[in-house]
Amino acid sequence: MSDADRTRTPWVAWAAPAAILAIDTRVALANTPFVGVTGADFRAFWTSGVLLVQGANPYTPPVGTLPNLNPPIWLPAFALLSHVNPVLGYCVWAVLSLALFTGLLALGLHRWHPRRPVFVASWLLASYPLWETITVGQVYVLVAVLVLGAFALWPRHPVVTGVLIGATIALKPNLAVWPVLLALDGDLGSGLLAVLVALIMSATSVLWYGPATLGSWLTAARDYDGVASLINGSLAGLAYQVKMPGAAVFGSVLLLLGSAAIVHLRRPGFFGTSSLAVLAGLLAAPVAWPGYLLLLLPMFLAWTWDGPWLGLVALTVLPNVVLGLLPAVGLLYPTIYLLLYARVVWRCCTRRPPITTAPLGHHLVRTSNSDSAASGSRR
């Protein structure tokens, strides 16, 4: 059998995601401003901005509105958002999110050159995490820009990479383990730079809005009962679903310590360490929504997804109308996150590199390890 035959994708492997994409689009359109509805999360961000402009506490929304759980660094953007009609703003943001993700996907396809690019692109465009993000009006695509930029620019631009990681942590503090694992992998410079950038950005927002706003955010995050959500993929969500909530903290600490040990002992390089850090940070957090999977775009593009892993691909494209029919839907996303974590651990322990890479602005090369793959050295 030729290489072409072995890597040819059966028509159903890309036709099925295409069909699910049509379903997801239909469901998303049913919840858009065209019928006078805004995404619940977008409404929370808009309301937070309105409260801030009015001089009120942006983390105490009126009854019936979800709280804004993003740190104060987001508040300037939400204040600007409050001057826009919420229906129009949501419509524009939904279109921009889809366009931005499509651009990220195109950039990633050029950077890592996955096998079966049509299949990979159709899978990611049909994925539930993308359409859930668009439907509720979340900001995960913006964070995904920073994450993909950090992966794509390493190691030719280590300073920019460190800045992007620091900005990511400031916007999503549940990824604070990232620079720690980089330091354990031997990349102390990028880790320290990321910590410095995150501290500067966070401190600036606290100085601007006052420590009371920071306290309000921490209180809102503590009081939010998202752990019980059926689409929470974190260890805390899993512990709640199996009626062992007390095991969540122990499991999260064990996972973080185990991740640190793997990185320190195996030294998997920037790509493996960063993939492990992002997944460990999400699993150890109180909540890990499906939309956070968009942050793993570099991993999805740089590694092969065939054989038994096609089952994991199928799980991520199940649309909302199908999820509601599953008998144990509360275990679905914890399972997805844990399977992804297991695959990252395996690749870190075996130090398997991304399949191929094309550094930005340079020709395509094949490599022998994860860091030389990013730097463009030939075999």
Image (cartoon, grey):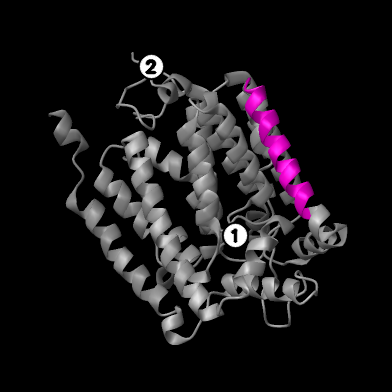
Towards the viewer: 311 or 195: 195
Along the horizontal axis of the image, is 16 left or right of 4?
A: right
Residue at (35, 59) in percent of width and height: 126
What kind of element bears circle 2?
A: loop
Residue at (80, 74) in percent of width and height: 55
Towards the viewer: 286 or 36: 36
Q: Quadrant of the C terminus?
A: top left
Instruction: Give the answer, above or below, for where 182 lies relative to 341.
Output: above
Specify the amino acid type for callout 1: Asn
Residue at (51, 49) in percent of width and height: 144
Does the CB distance between marks 1 and 2 fall below 8 Å?
no
x then y, percent, for residue 110: 32, 38
Q: Is residue 160 in sight in this rendering?
A: yes
Towards the viewer: 23 or 313: 23
For label 1, the residue is 232
Q: Which range is magenta?
A: 186-205
For label 2, the residue is 377
Q: Quadrant of the N terminus?
A: top left
Specify the amino acid type for callout 2: Ser
x then y, percent, for residue 238: 63, 55
